[in-house]
Amino acid sequence: MHVSTRRNPTAQPTEMVARRASNGEGALPARIPPPALHKVPDTGLARTPPMGWNSWNKFAGRIDDATVRAIANAMASNGMREAGYVYINIDDTWEAGRDARGNIQTNKKFPDMKALADYVHKKGLKLGIYSSPGPNTCAGYEGSYGHEEQDAKTYAAWGIDYLKYDWCGARTIYTDEEMPAIYQKMGDALRATGRPIVYSLCQYGRLNVWKWGADVGGNLWRTTGDIRDAWDSMSRIGFGQSDLAEWAKPGHWNDPDMLEIGNGGMSETEYKTHMSLWAMLAAPLLAGNDLRSMSPATLEILTNREVIAADQDKEGKQGKRVWKSSDQEIWTRQLSGGAVAVAVFNRAAESAQVSVRWPDLGITGKPKLRDLWLHQSVESQGAEHPVTVPGHGVVMLRATR
Ligand code: GLA
């Protein structure tokens, strides 16, 4: 039985678990004890935060082979690929049951996953897929429970390059404390295939995943519940990440969820804030809109190379809030070569004047400034540099000596 895939308005993971078909297989499967934890080698993947696209935010259950191909075509021809976007990630709802040997099957929306991966690879892009450590996924489809190695081998045989592994269905069997072992199990299985597969943990930040995500082989881990295409959701998540900065590093990233840019629920100004904030956070940049039909303004936000360069800075140091006064905040992020990304955010609805005091940001002397949205140099106005920030907007600067 496949249940519907409505988005959950409460920003919690869509929970439709423990609903086995009503045809007699209703009981939960027997519990498989979690494996012992061990030391996991670094796979060397995701040296910078992954960039790409994911189907869930826009399409949820309405994603299929033809749409994925069309999205890949768009990404390969609209400048996104050249700007660094590479992963095309199929989220939940591709799965069918298993064959007699236990091999995971695709449902009729995805008639041939290997052919789809070949197609995406020919476009110079990579293909991602989704599963759960539980018997079911969040949307009620087949999970990997008891088939971890087999599924990892299947993904590798198909040519999959990225796995998002979503907890939901596992909570009927395991406790939160068992998460590290359960995530390590799939991480081991992926590594054993010998294929480089980026490993994305999705358990909504439970059990302080940032403290152990890297140890179990994760390249990124969700830090929150699901984002929605609305200012309150995006800003609550984004501005809530400052304390996690120390856990991000090359190969291992905090993931505040996928982008909503271009989905229509926020203004252009708010989407610029979304993009800037995610870049300050060294967050994965996974577009979540319909790349086949976006406006030039949306494309411009998603492909702002100067903001992307900050996100992808090779030192991988996540930025944090260094100043706050009512609804205005200044965040800084150390970049390689001694540069600093400075984002002045205005969370109020009306525009605001903010005085940026360089000494307070640890920037000595008179910095050279580049405005990353206006794409021009700016003259620093001395120790107190005034900026005007639109309501829900941002001024993002790159400061160098
Ligand atoms: C959870 C995840 C979402 C998405 C859905 C799919 O809610 O957090 O990102 O993958 O499941 O069912």
Image: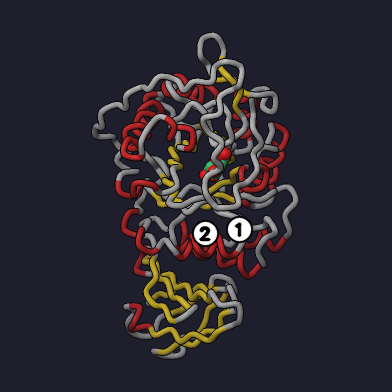
Tell me: 72 left or right of 227: right
Q: Secondary structure at mark 2?
A: helix
Residue 308: assigned label: 2
Residue 146: x and y, percent? 42, 21
Q: Earlier in the sequence, mark 1 or mark 2?
A: 1
Q: Which residue is drawn at the image coordinates 52% and 49% (left, top)?
A: 12
Q: Does the residue tagged 2 have its C-beta within 8 Å of any atom of ligand 1?
A: no
Q: Position of residue 31 (x, y in %)?
A: 37, 22
Q: Is residue 388 above or below residue 19?
A: below
Question: For residue 190, which quarter of the picture?
Answer: top left
Name the amino acid, label 1: Thr
Task: Write the residue at 73% across / 59% down.
Answer: 295
SS at badge 1: loop
| Location of mark 1 (residue) | 303
Could you tell me if residue 291 is visible in this image?
yes
| Amino acid type shown at disc 2 | Ile
The picture quadrant for ligand 1 comes to: top right
| Image marks 1 and 2: residues in contact by CB distance under 8 Å | yes
Percent coordinates x, y for residue 292 in the rendering: 73, 47
Of residues 63 and 51, the one drawn nearer to the viewer in this rendering:
63
